[in-house]
Amino acid sequence: MKAVVLGVGNTILADEGVGVRVIEAFERDYAVPDGVAVIDGGTAGMELLEPLSRLDFLLVVDAIAAGKAPGELVKLVGTEVPVFFRRNLSPHGIGLSDVLAALEFTGDSPKETVVIGVQPVSMELSTELTRGIAARVPELVAQVADELSARGLAPIQKVGVGGTA
Amino acid sequence: MSKRITIDPITRIEGHLRIDCDVDGGRVKKAWSSGQMWRGVELILLGRDPRDAWTITQRICGVCTTVHAIASVRAVENALKLEIPLNAQYIRNLIILAHAVHDHIVHFYHLSALDWVDVTSALKADPDKTAALAESLSSWKLNGKHEMRAVKERLAGFVNGGQLGIFTNGYWGHPAMKLPPEVNLLAVAHYLQALDVQRKANKIVSILGSKTPHIQNLAVGGVANAIATDSQSVLTVERLMAIKGWIDELDDFVKNVYLVDVAAVGAFYADWTKYGAGITNYLSVPDIPLDTKGTQFALPGGFIENKNLLGQKQIKSFDDDFWGKGVEESVKHSWYDYSTQQPLHPYQGETKPNYTDFQDGGKYSWLKSPTFYGKPAQVGPLARVLNMVSAGHEPTKKYADTALKLVSSLAKTQVGIDALHSTIGRHAARAVGCAVQVDELANQWNLLMANIAKGDTKTFNQPVFPKGEVMGVGFHEAPRGVLSHWVVIDDGKIKNYQCVVPSTWNACPRNEKDEAGPYEASLLDNPIADPEKPLEVLRTIHSFDPCIACAIHLTDKENDTSVSVKVL
């Protein structure tokens, strides 16, 4: 079993960086089993081709413009996933969507892809999340752990960490 | 009857670029290039510790992470007059060169080849003839019949499955597509192989940079890599040997596939040597420093005015005033205001947004308009190669000659260096430059190994921040051209920070004297066969390898290119 938890987003545009902030918090609080990699993808493109090749499970964490109320959590599965990338709902769709399209052509696509995230409040220039979105980070961290556990890849909460929930 | 074409956004690039053209009689008569994103990273940096700037600037863009990190540490080191250890230079040089090779391969095969290659035509190709053609051009190991048959089968399965996926946005069957089916199939085969090869370049960056896409090993004063010949956790001989293996694989692909493919495409599209020259003032900076101060470089740079290769003036060092005093930026046609009605030097640069609407004769872009001694300048692979040729750099002359001879023999006509001032010439120059870079990659690896063998394991010099104000510029010859970061430091904190990025030089709006920028000028007189499908505009714009993701904005529009045509 090979899985990647990929946090994407731009950390200098406030809530746009929530995906990266979630995986930072997740890595601080949890140790992952063998076969699972946690990657800060930023707004990268083709550099991700290698780490995203031939995965059993890809979990993307991102800011999602799904027309929901700001701060609402969003989860996309199955056929919603390609629509998400094609419609460029991700603010930085071009890089990652190109990588996934290339993997499709070479036959190396992840067997399962799930996208979790949150409707952003602000995309203004700032290295900090807005308060409302920062408050949702612990839930998203817990959700990352749950998604992995559901696939037999349960991460282990680090001792001495106060817990994120 | 004149028509206005608006392409918004231009696809297969990083960032949001809008291009407008007035077309009359099947030719572009006037063009506007408009960056549609506000970039304010400079404001985030004010008041911060200069040692942290590079980790923030590498978040400006998803493609150019490494290059902003390099330019940033160089700017702070320049302000402090801080020398860095030789090992640190060599390790940075390896990262710079591996990143550049990666970037050029991806740009040609994955971001721009589809402007010239008709994927659907490849389905009509005879794979055995394709292999015969390929083997006549190059000794590359993956040009055989079995390979070409397998690629055609994969492509047919993909297209017949009803989803074009990565090929969705192409102008298939466009009258300006000229390659025979066999050449199209060969290009698709190499497109796939390039996907695999580019990973090797990226592995070099990730091992040396500790991580990718955002490297973690830089520091103001050197690099954070510890060098040891006997430890597992640091840069070991074993890891260095793995890097050498990947360099050799990249070398094979760049010289036997990339350079050859560009020459072949160039020969079939020889008419595109007549279009797209635009601004022929060429600016590049020297890079790949060979000493601790940045006064000797493996790759020269300089300024050429109006195609005059013999009149080149070289830029000699990180401290060269000819460079430092020549740069200014105008906002006359940009959505910013300055406190004066003059262009400003980056040390005095201001970042105050003032959005108006798109005004043909007024403000119409988020990009500023930089000039070198008051003149617009083209930057990037063509500027780099012409400046290296002018400076007498032998490897560049050799690969330029190889490429032009191959084009001449395939096109059955004499093609000289003058042909490089064009849309297709920029692709050729990028491949020539990439061959030079892959050689230099091996050279820097040898220099690093030799220096370690001498017992030198130093990688870092401690920076010391003085009281009061200091300023510095870090320049870097990035894949897309001259990148410079300008920093003013006051009592150890950032007081001003300006990034003048390559795509600002090329994609800029008109300047203080209302002269067009390189994109705008290069589009003049381009043919347009069908205004609804302006493939020719994409060809010229993509040849610069645009990258203007200096920030990201939220969108929920369809990701397809939107072209609108209006009768004027």
Image (cartoon, coloured by chain):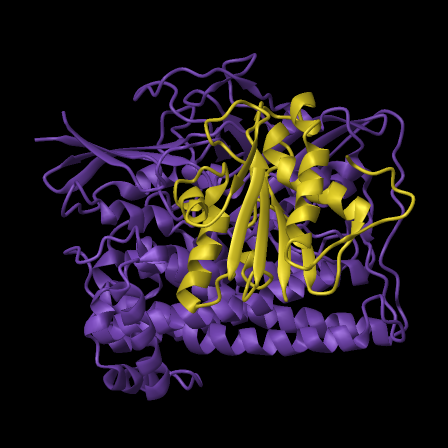
Chain colours: A yellow, B purple
Q: Tell me the quarter of the picture where residue B319 sits.
A: top right
Vertical side of B524 occupied by B224: above or below:
below
- Quadrant of the image occupied by residue B499: top right
Where residue A103 appears, as percent x and y from the top left, is: 46, 62
x 36%, y 25%: residue = B514
Q: Is residue A41 above or below residue B470?
A: below
The one nearer the camera, B349 or B40, is B40
| Image position of B183 with respect to B206: above or below | below
Give x and y (percent) for residue A24: 73, 43
* Side (left or right) of A102 relative to A50: left
Residue extending farthest to the left is B1
Residue found at the far top of this picture: B339
Q: Is residue B563 above or below residue B455?
A: above
Q: Residue at x 66, y 61 (%)?
A: B205
Front position in the image: B194 or B568: B194
Q: How many marks?
A: 0
Rendered-image quadrant of the N terminus of chain B: top left
Can residue A31 be seen by looking at this rendering? yes
Q: Position of residue A50 (x, y in %)?
A: 57, 64
Viewer-proximal residue among B303 and B525: B525
The answer to whether residue B401 shows anywhere in this view is no
Q: Is residue A142 toward the left or the right of residue B462 in the image? A: left
Horizontally, residue B145 falls left or right of residue B511, namely left
Quarter the C terminus of chain B occupies: top left
Residue B169 in picture, x, y percent from top left: 30, 50
